[in-house]
Image (cartoon, rainbow, N blue to C red):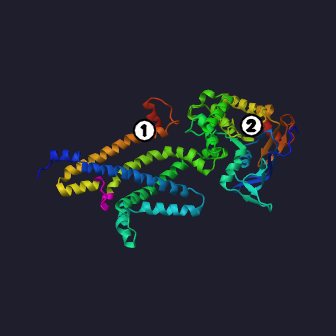
Amino acid sequence: MKAWDWESFFEYLFSPYLLEGVWVTIWLTAASLLIGLVCGLIAALLRISKNPVLQMPARLYIWIWRGTPLLVQLIILYTGLPQIGIRLSVIQSALIGLGVNEGAYLSEIIRAGIMSVDRGQFNAARALGMNYRVMMRRIILPQAARIIVPELGNRFNGLLKFSSLASVISLEELMRRAQMLTQAKFRVLEIFFVASIYYLILTTIWGIAQARIEDYFERGYSQKNSGKTKRLVRAA
Amino acid sequence: MNMKEGPQPIVEAVNVHKYFHDNHVLRGVNLSIHEREVIVICGPSGSGKSTFLRCLNHLEKIDDGRIRVCGHYVGYTERKDGHLVELRESEVAKQRLSTGMVFQHFDLFPHLTALENITVAPIYVLKQSEKDAKDEAHRLLKRVGLSEKADHYPGQLSGGQKQRVAIARALAMNPRVMLFDEPTSALDPEMIGEVLDVMLDLSKQGITMIVVSHEMGFARAAAQRVAFMEAGTIIEEASPAEFFDSPKSERLQQFLRKIL
């Protein structure tokens, strides 16, 4: 067997089989982040409420889901739950596993974002007659987003890679497809190099998108100066 | 006393007490303000003036006493048997529509333009149409002299400009009483005048104003009454002329000596 087969490498680089896996990775990541955002937002709002009865479930959720490995959670969901009669499909298990796990981490990020908003903003919003929902939706969360979004971007980057864990419960995302391909073709190094390249392309594209999104949320805070000054302002 | 009399005070505080943990910040404040009246409350820092102002729109909860604004009990509703029941936050929010507040540190919404700062509450609280809200906002910006800054963000405005936008923002909700919490204390001296001019203009239009401030020139020019607050109670209140030229209490005389 050759040490490195360029022909195979390029064949796999443009393989529809792997590209389908890439597509699954993309939507799995996006959907999981969305689920995570919903769970995280609810948990964060419960966590900051003054009512201890509301705080408890949030603290419990965060403690358990951040305290156990994602891999174990995925396996329990897909392979363990059927034992007590709950049968989740591969996709359901992957989405719930990744999403709910991510939510536990995001809740702390969201909470930090909300707490970073100046108290005066809450007073000004209330003084204008805003109720809780309007205040959070229009005034507080948009400002908290400034703190939350960069970290959200990092989490998305991480999720792009952690989605590969769903291969363990045989979801046919990129990692699983790469594995299955090596079982048929044996060119392990070439195939996983290609997979790595795809992951790198995804995370790089996301990096660019993230920078644009961060700029949008920074509007109104930094003066419209040259790019150099903007970088300085951000470092401070 | 030189007061514009009305049938019923628009703001009435009776025996108001407030504690911050062990600190007895308000020790029985009594004050009645009538519609179209302008009253300035001054006093040393720590006297409770800002806290009292915040109790008027329930940004702070009182521990004893009663406050009525436009006839309703602030933060509470009266049951048929005479007992007061605490209101839910959403109901308190509705009560706050009768008052408008201007803060010492402006507290404009940094992620919104000046125009959006003014329209956000009318659109999402009063459910006005975007067009109506914008038209009114432009009108208010013109009134405070900032028409050309409509699309600027607070970060691009000076302190005096920010405060004038804040005043317009409060006015957009059509409150019956305007509350000013040391509106010029955080401003550089050269910008104080532009804000006081707007406030003087407002006072002449018959808006009820309760102003916590040290700006004695404004008090003389605009107020019907000036009140001196120290250590949680109102020591003296009088017309500006009596207040500044013939203060009765020793503590007020001391205070005036220090600041004038």
Q: Nearer the viewer, residue B230 or B199?
A: B199
Q: Nearer the viewer, mark 1 or mark 2?
A: 1
* Mark 1 surroundings: few (<14), some (14-19) or many (≥20) residues within 10 A: few
Verify CB contact (< 8 Å) between mark 1 and mark 2: no
Do we see residue A107 in this rendering?
A: no
- Residue located 38% across and 63% down the image: A73
Magenta segment includes A148: no
Element carrying mark 2: loop
Label 1, label 2: how many angstroms apart (C-alpha)?
A: 46 Å
The boundaries of the magenta stretch are A166-174
Q: Which residue is mark 1?
A: A212
List the residue tagged with mark 2.
Answer: B214
Q: Are marks 1 and 2 on the same chain?
A: no
State left or right for residue A112 relative to residue B14.
left
Q: Amino acid at mark 1?
A: Arg
Mark seen at residue A152: none
Circle 2 residues within 10 Å: few <14, some 14–19, many ≥20: some
